Every structure is written in structure tokens, then in C-alpha cells.
């Protein structure tokens, strides 16, 4: 019985910490974008014409010299 006097407050403290960490993660944007990381592994980062991982404000037209000629 005396063990319950220690275990119940410890369990409540642990639940409180877990809830605090969960709400911190939600507020800091940890769960905002779950789709892009899964799709980003499908693209080659070295391709200069690859625009999916580039922010819209950083996008610029690729140079015609870098693009291979089309057949």
C-alpha cells in the first residue's frame, strides 16, 4: 500500500510531462507537413532542374546551357 503513495504521483507527473511535450510539439510545428519528407526521397537533389525541394521564392529558370538537348 505505501508504494501506491509514490507510484500514483509519479504516474501523474509522467502523464503531465508527456502531455506538455505533445502540446509543445504541436505548437512548434512538428506535425505540420507529414507528406513532403516521404516524397523527397524519390527525387535526386543533384538535379538542377528539380524544383520540388526549392522554395517558391528561391526558384529561378534553369540555364539553357545546363539542360541537355531534347531529341
Image: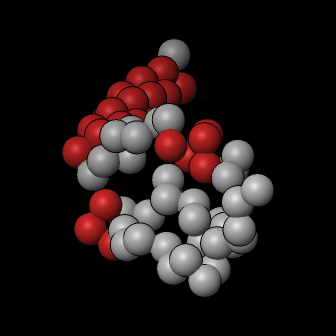
Is residue 68 among what the camera can see? yes
Q: Which residue: 27% across, 52% down?
A: 28
Q: From the viewer's perspective, is 18 left or right of 52?
A: left
What percent of the width, then of the height, locates residue 64? 55, 77
Q: From the viewer's perspective, is 41 left or right of 40?
A: right
Against 27, is 7 above or below? above
Q: From the viewer's perspective, is 41 left or right of 29?
A: right
- Residue at the front extreme of this rendering: 71
Q: Which residue: 41% across, 71% down?
A: 61
Q: Which residue: 38% across, 46% down?
A: 30
Quadrant of the rendered structure where residue 20 is? top left
- Residue at the top extreme of this rendering: 1
The answer to which of 68 and 14 lies nearer the viewer is 68
**Quadrant the C terminus occupies:** bottom right
The answer to which of 28 and 41 lies nearer the viewer is 41
What percent of the width, then of the height, locates residue 63? 51, 79
Amino acid at each position: 500500500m505505501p508504494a501506491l503513495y509514490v507510484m500514483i504521483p509519479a504516474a501523474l507527473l509522467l502523464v503531465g510531462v508527456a502531455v506538455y511535450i505533445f502540446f509543445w510539439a504541436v505548437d512548434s510545428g512538428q506535425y505540420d507537413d507529414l507528406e513532403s519528407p516521404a516524397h523527397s526521397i524519390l527525387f535526386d537533389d543533384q538535379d538542377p532542374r528539380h524544383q520540388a525541394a526549392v522554395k517558391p521564392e528561391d526558384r529561378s529558370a534553369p540555364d539553357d546551357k545546363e539542360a541537355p538537348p531534347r531529341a
